[in-house]
């Protein structure tokens, strides 16, 4: 069972994704802004972070950069899940250290497969 930090400013999306991930056996912690996200990261380092880019209290890129700069968290995989449609959004996220990039709304099967890849698990057939 992996611990996942889910960071998004949309409370309804957070709940839907939390339900999806917990139903697949993951422990999920949530944060609705960048400040809370960093507090959660340092409270208990997660196995994976799913991060939106458009956040109040520090945008997702800032969170990603802080995660990458800390020796304690630099190896944590970060899946950026964002509604930003610009091509630069992916390039910026990847250059800041994103491990994977998906656009919202993500297909649940695609999201779960990406999570399994990032956690080093073989996706169920």
Image (cartoon, rainbow, N blue to C red):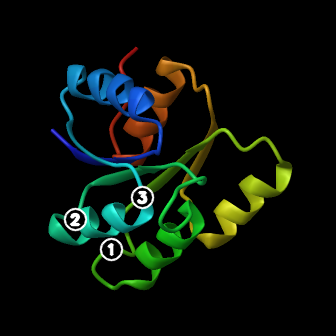
Image location of residue 53, percent across then percent down: 59, 54
Q: Which residue is mark 3?
A: 77
Relative to 83, say whether 75 is above or below.
below
Q: Is residue 72 left or right of residue 66?
A: left
Is residue 123 visible in this depiction of the protein? no
Would you call the spot at circle 2 few (<14 residues within 10 Å), some (14-19), or many (20 or more)? Answer: some
Image location of residue 59, percent across then percent down: 56, 64
Point out the tag, 1 or 2, that comes first from the N-terminus: 2
Image location of residue 21, percent across then percent down: 29, 28
Among the 4 quarters of the image, the one containing residue 25 = top left
Q: Nearer the viewer, mark 3 or mark 2?
A: 2
Image quadrant occupied by the N terminus: top left
Among the 4 quarters of the image, the one containing residue 71 = bottom left
**Helix, strand or loop status at disc 1:** loop
Mark pair 3, 2: CA separation:
11 Å
Q: Which residue is mark 2?
A: 45
Mark pair 3, 1: CA separation:
9 Å
**Helix, strand or loop status at disc 3:** loop
Image location of residue 101, percent across then percent down: 61, 46
Q: Are marks 1 and 2 in contact (CB under 8 Å)?
A: yes
Q: Residue furthest front?
A: 56
Residue depicted at x 47% and y 66%: 57
Q: Residue furthest top?
A: 125
Q: Are marks 3 and 1 in contact (CB under 8 Å)?
A: no
**Helix, strand or loop status at disc 2:** loop
Would you call the spot at circle 1 few (<14 residues within 10 Å), some (14-19), or many (20 or more)? Answer: some
Q: Which mark is residue 73?
A: 1
Q: Nearer the viewer, residue 62 or 68?
A: 62
Residue depicted at x 32% and y 62%: 36
């Amino acid at each position: 069972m992996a611990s996942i930090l889910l960071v998004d400013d949309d409370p309804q999306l957070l709940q839907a994704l939390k339900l999806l991930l917990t139903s697949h056996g993951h422990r999920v912690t949530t944060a609705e802004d960048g400040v809370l996200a960093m507090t959660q990261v340092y409270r208990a380092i997660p196995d994976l972070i799913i991060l939106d880019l458009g956040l109040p209290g520090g945008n997702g890129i800032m969170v990603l950069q802080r995660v990458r700069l800390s020796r304690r968290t630099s190896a944590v995989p970060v899946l950026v899940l964002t509604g930003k449609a610009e091509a630069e959004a992916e390039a910026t996220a990847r250059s800041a250290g994103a491990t994977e990039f998906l656009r919202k709304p993500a297909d649940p099967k695609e999201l779960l497969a990406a999570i399994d890849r990032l956690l080093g698990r073989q996706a169920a057939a």
